[in-house]
Image (cartoon, rainbow, N blue to C red):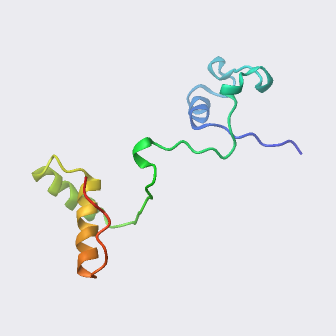
Amino acid sequence: MAKKTRTSLSAALNIAAHGPGSAKLRQAPAAQRSQAEQPTMGAKSTRVDRIGRVNVTGYFDPSVKASFRLIQAQHPDRSLQDLLAEALDDLFAKYNVPQAAKVR
């Protein structure tokens, strides 16, 4: 059985847009690529502003996002992340735990 190769998102999008035989997709064989071009398995690319942080998510009714947008309309300088940090700090204060979601 042949080993499956991982396709990057950009390559998958090119295949979807131009078809699998597209000239845009042809690359040099892996043996001919420089070491810098070689993909590293398992390596993560993390934005600098996200280093040392974790993602906290949830699924809510679309009206929740609409409510956030109404607040942002009144306070355009506040990002969704700022508003969520403020809400989390209010929740932490209610339950008397350290307020760790400091607003930037």
Instruction: Tally the numbered discs.
Output: 0
Q: Is residue 81 above or below residue 35?
A: below
Q: Where is residue 101 in the image (x, y as percent from the top left)?
A: 31, 63
Which residue: 86% across, 42% down?
2
**Front-lying residue, 67 or 15:** 67
**Front-lying residue, 75 or 47:** 47
Q: Quadrant of the N terminus?
A: top right
Q: Where is residue 93 in the image (x, y as percent from the top left)?
A: 24, 76
The quadrant where residue 84 appears: bottom left
**Front-lying residue, 77 or 10:** 77
Q: Which residue lies furthest to the bottom in this view?
A: 95
Residue 77 placement, left or right of 37: left
Which residue: 71% across, 22% down?
34
Residue 23 placement, left or right of 47: right
Residue 78 placement, left or right of 43: left
Which residue: 75% across, 39% down?
5
Q: Where is residue 11 in the image (x, y as percent from the top left)?
A: 61, 31
The quadrant where residue 56 appears: bottom left
Q: In this view, does 104 lie above or below 16?
A: below
Q: Which residue lies furthest to the front in this view?
A: 98
Q: In this view, does 29 lie above or below 4?
A: above
Which residue: 55% across, 29% down?
17
The quadrant where residue 38 appears: top right
